[in-house]
């Protein structure tokens, strides 16, 4: 009996000393959403993502619309095309910029105008290197249609 208890204690101590699977910590910097004009049914969301561990952006959601997709702009046969992508790699320690003309989040099926000065809640769906899924909540301010990179309003939410 004594031997079983001691053996169990050693087994428990060994399990407790195993490394735990760390979750990737993804920070979000300079999030923003482009304002729309009346009747426009889609807009883009942009931000800079950085993960402490290898991870992937699998998708996003927003209370603004039921249809939110991760997109990429790319040249195909001398024509700039936008297409949906399954994921965006987030290499450990490297900033990944979602920007106009590159990777970005498309919010589709809008039924109302997205106006400058308001904000949009976006939930990013992340998968870490261990295959665990996480959510990162972001509040992105809405900027004017003619906003250029570098006219950023600092803020947002990191996780």
Image (spheres, rainbow, N blue to C red):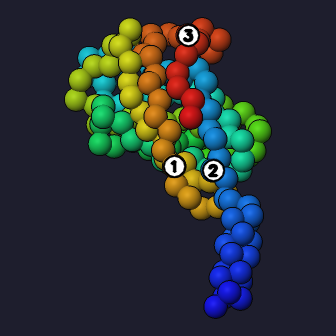
Name the residue rendered at 67%, 53% in the picture: 22
Name the mark on residue 153.
Answer: 3
Mark 1 or 3: the one toward you: 1
Left or right, 20 with reference to 63 = right
For the residue labelled by badge 3, is the local secondary structure a helix, a strand or a loop?
A: loop
**Disc 1 to disc 2, how far (Cα)?**
8 Å
Residue, disc 2? 23
Which residue is tagged 1? 134
Q: Residue at x 57, y 41 (%)?
A: 72
Q: Nearer the viewer, residue 81 or 41?
A: 41
The residue closer to the viewer here, 39 or 58, is 58
Compared to 67, does 143 lie above or below?
above
Residue 19 seen in this snapshot: yes
Q: Residue 36: where, in percent of width, then height?
A: 36, 18
Residue at 67 percent across and 59 percent down: it is 21
The correct choice, above or below, for 124 with respect to 131 in the image is above
């Amino acid at each position: 009996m004594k031997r079983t208890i001691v053996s169990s204690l050693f087994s428990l101590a060994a399990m407790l000393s195993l490394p735990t699977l760390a979750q990737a910590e993804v920070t979000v910097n300079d999030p923003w959403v482009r304002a729309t004009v009346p009747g426009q049914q889609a807009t883009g969301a942009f931000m800079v993502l950085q993960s402490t561990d290898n991870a992937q952006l699998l998708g996003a959601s927003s209370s603004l619309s039921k249809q939110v997709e991760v997109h990429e702009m790319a040249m195909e046969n001398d024509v700039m095309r936008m297409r949906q992508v399954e994921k965006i790699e987030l290499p450990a320690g490297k900033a990944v910029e979602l920007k106009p003309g590159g990777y970005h989040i498309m919010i589709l099926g809008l039924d109302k105008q997205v106006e400058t000065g308001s904000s949009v809640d976006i939930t990013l769906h992340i998968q870490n290197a261990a295959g665990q899924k996480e959510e990162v909540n972001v509040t992105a301010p809405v900027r004017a249609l003619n906003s250029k990179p570098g006219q950023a309003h600092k803020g947002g939410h990191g996780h």
